[in-house]
Image (cartoon, rainbow, N blue to C red):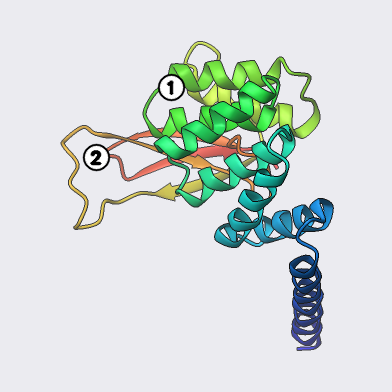
């Protein structure tokens, strides 16, 4: 189809542009703006390992740049399957020490708390993020996440519904009654999830609701 041809042409043009940017960035390692642009572009494409190499190099040159530290911590978190490893925790803590109002880092803390089964802590982190002046769709996402995590504030949400079926693979050993947290996240959005649902090990189908 013609649309497929155009898509392939657009993709080829984009990859050519990206290769050109990468070549120029390699020739100009001290150009912080250019290299940061390349790193963020790699992140948007899911190429986190390449992004991390650039961000780590930039941090050695600009160690006091709070935005750079935040970008590095977020990329490190995502590349570690959104797990709060010791390395990720150190990077996130450093970013928050440099900027306690960093909404992305507060969201990362909340997402990590969900993965660790600490719903109350996740709610606290998301609520703190809301107090930092966030507005619009991002604020709505945080409120939905809080509502789905906190029984005291949970409310019926209007919008799209997504049916999710979860099953444990043969290599996964889960005790009877174990809880699994499933969260929906915008592909190109902030770390905060659109919705969160706690499933029991013997539950096959549950509804996640997210407006869109």
**52 shown above or below 27:** above
Position of 124 with respect to 63 (left or right) is: left
Which residue is identified by label 2?
A: 202
Position of 54 with respect to 172 (left or right) is: right
- The residue that appears at 82% across and 74% down in the rendered structure is 17
User: Image quarter for residue 87?
Assistant: top left
- Element type at marker 2? loop
- Residue that lies at the very extreme toward the top in this rendered image: 152
- The residue that appears at 60% across and 34% down in the rendered structure is 192
Q: For this rendering, which residue is in front, 12 or 145? A: 12
Position of 23 with respect to 147 (left or right) is: right
Crowd band around label 2 with a 10 angstrom C-alpha radius: few (<14), some (14–19), many (20+)? few
Give x and y (percent) for residue 26. 74, 68
User: Image quarter for residue 9?
Assistant: bottom right
User: Image quarter for residue 15?
Assistant: bottom right
**29 shown above or below 107:** below
Can you see residue 187? no
- The residue that appears at 62% across and 24% down in the rendered structure is 96
Q: Earlier in the sequence, mark 1 or mark 2?
A: 1
Which residue is identified by label 1?
A: 119
Give x and y (percent) for residue 95. 62, 30
- Element type at marker 1? helix
Crowd band around label 1 with a 10 angstrom C-alpha radius: few (<14), some (14–19), many (20+)? many
């Amino acid at each position: 189809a013609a649309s497929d041809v155009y898509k392939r042409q657009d993709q080829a043009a984009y990859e050519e542009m990206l290769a050109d940017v990468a070549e120029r960035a390699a020739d100009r390692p001290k150009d912080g703006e250019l290299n940061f642009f390349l790193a963020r572009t790699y992140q948007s494409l899911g190429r986190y390992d390449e992004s991390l190499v650039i961000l780590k190099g930039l941090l050695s040159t600009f160690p006091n740049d709070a935005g750079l530290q935040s970008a590095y911590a977020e990329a490190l978190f995502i590349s570690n399957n959104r797990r709060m490893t010791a390395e990720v925790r150190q990077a996130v803590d450093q970013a928050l020490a440099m900027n306690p109002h960093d909404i992305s880092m507060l969201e990362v803390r909340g997402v990590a708390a969900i993965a660790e089964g600490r719903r109350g802590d996740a709610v606290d982190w998301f609520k703190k993020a809301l107090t930092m002046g966030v507005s619009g769709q991002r604020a709505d996402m945080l409120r939905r996440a809080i509502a789905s995590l906190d029984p005291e504030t949970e409310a019926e949400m209007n919008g799209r519904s997504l049916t999710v079926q979860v099953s444990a693979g043969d290599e996964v050993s889960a005790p009877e009654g174990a809880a699994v947290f499933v969260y929906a996240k915008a592909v190109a959005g902030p770390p905060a999830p659109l919705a969160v649902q706690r499933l029991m090990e013997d539950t096959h189908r549950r509804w996640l609701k997210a407006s869109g």
